[in-house]
Image: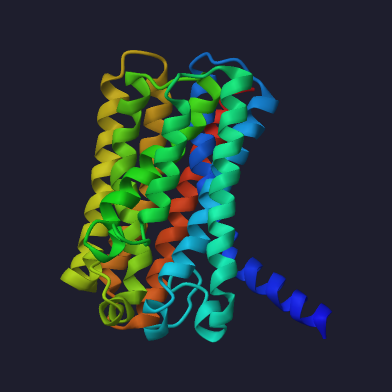
Amino acid sequence: MGICREGGVVRDLVRMGRFRFLLAGALCFLLGALLALRWGAPWDPERLLLGYAIFGCGHLSVHYSNEYFDRDADRHGTAGIFSGGTGVLVARPERAPAARGFAIGLIAASLSLALLFQALYRPAPWFFLFIVAGNLLGWYYSAPPLSLSYHGLGEAATMFGAAFMMPATGYLVVKGTLDPAFILFCLPLLPLGYFFILSVELPDMEADRAGGKNTAVVRRGREAALRSVAAAAFLSTALFLLAGLFWPDPAAAFLKVMAAASAIPLSAGIWALRAGARDRPEAEARTRLLVTCLVLFFLLSDIVLAAGLA
């Protein structure tokens, strides 16, 4: 009986981890790391792996903290592939302390590894504070008193976190600092961060409203959100094109490739807008398409960058 209970706890903890989302985060992290290598940083696999361990622990902690702090709101909805939580704490509320403990433990691991990285590789003096900021952003996305996703700031937090903090962490651990060129490079990614968060919010409109979340989809409805998704994808493509035309160094060619690759989420956004999302099942289908196409964009960009380094 004890073994069965322990096995159930482990199974539930694995479910709450939603490990499939780590792939998208890893691709964003790798984009920054590969860009640093393309721009002249030395190749050091041990440094890169330690850097990803810092990032991966912090990213995974968000899954557990969201599951814990959203458990009341999740009672109003159903679990989906990319949205709605996992439903574990709705069915088994006694797992809540374990979820919170895992979230805190992963943050502690991320920060401990960041201190080790600082000692071993001597990156910019503010490196540790950057990692602290990333972990706090993930924690307070749903945790009180800030509860960003409940106070209309979830989209801004996700844009900054997914489109800047994630690739910036990869760039920072490889190069040791951030520079203006990288920050400019991230500008076309910001609309894609908005594209992502609106996409995953689509199916949960009714549940989020009932649970007190103040998301853009709750405020404006699904059709307006789909218009914003398509507009965000268009803006990203336009910014990549402009950057590719005016960037003064060899990265211009890669930016043009990214502009072409961004046609994947742009096409998905336009199609989803035309198809509409009148109810949750349709919204689920649109979310699957939009998120999959966004992941394909990052995967293709990473492959092109890696091929250029070979």
In the displayed structure, 125 sits above or below 131; it is above
Colour option used: rainbow
Which quarter shows the N terminus? bottom right
Drawn side of residue 218 relative to residue 137, left or right: left
In the displayed structure, 82 sits above or below 197; it is below
Residue at (42%, 24%) from the top-left corner? Answer: 126
Residue 39 in picture, x, y percent from top left:
48, 17
Residue 124 appears anywhere in the view? yes
Residue at (71%, 70%) from the top-left corner? Answer: 10
Residue 9 in picture, x, y percent from top left:
69, 74
Residue 18 appears anywhere in the view? no
In the displayed structure, 227 sits above or below 254; it is below
Residue 104 in picture, x, y percent from top left:
53, 54
In the displayed structure, 21 sits above or below 94; it is above
Which quarter shows the C terminus? top right
Residue at (43%, 27%) from the top-left corner? Answer: 254
Residue at (48%, 75%) from the top-left corner? Answer: 80
Residue 135 in picture, x, y percent from top left:
45, 45
Between residues 215 and 231, which one lies in front from this camera angle? 215
Tell me how many marks there are: 0
Between residues 23 and 11, which one lies in front from this camera angle? 11
